Image (cartoon, grey):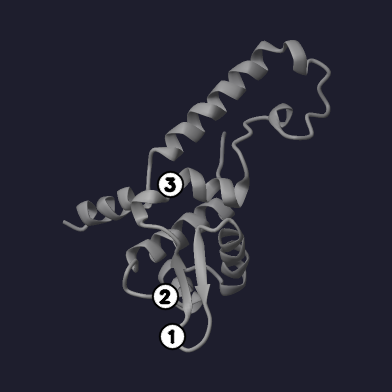
Amino acid sequence: MLRLSTKGQYGVRAMFELAKNFEKGPLSIKEISERQDVSISYLEQLLNKLRRSKLIKSRKGPGGGYVISSRPDEISIGMILNALEGPVTITQCLGPKAKGCNRVEGCVARLLWKSLGEKIENFLDTISLNDLLKEETRLKR
């Protein structure tokens, strides 16, 4: 079973909160933590990675916090997950350290897993934070 780690899950949720607050100003880490029920210490790690990937900006001082660096329709879920988790690698043989398999060069199954990973990445790149905002609006009706 393929599973997304908590880094990806919580990172998308944090970015969703920042997208909801787009053009309203920064959100503090405490506000994000409370709204999404994620510990502040874990959130700090995720937000630092997102900041280093230039998906968010931090503002210091009173009234400071975090903001997304682009409009919600310009940030895809794929961008967020790639920043937090790296590229999709369905199996170890697709990772940067393809060790443990001496069949990498001519393996048909490897080609299947590579293709699946590319399809997943392409799909995630088609969904933006704006799409999540629209979905939330639809669900609240």
Q: Residue 5: tell me if it is visible.
A: no
Which amino acid type is marked by label 3?
Answer: Ser
Q: Which element carries disc 1, helix, strand or loop?
A: loop
Which amino acid type is marked by label 1?
Answer: Gly
> Measured along the vertical axis of the image, is residue 96 above or below residue 79?
above
- Side (left or right) of 130 relative to 113: left
- Kindly identify the residue that appears in the image at 58 percent across and 50 percent down: 83
Which amino acid type is marked by label 2?
Answer: Pro
Q: Residues within 10 Å of mark 1 (few under 14, many from 20)?
A: few
Residue under label 2, please give it: 26
- Side (left or right) of 60 relative to 63: right
Residue under label 3, please give it: 76
Q: Which element carries disc 3, helix, strand or loop?
A: loop
Residue nearer the viewer, 47 or 113: 47
Residue nearer the viewer, 123 or 71: 71
Residue 68 in picture, x, y percent from top left: 44, 63
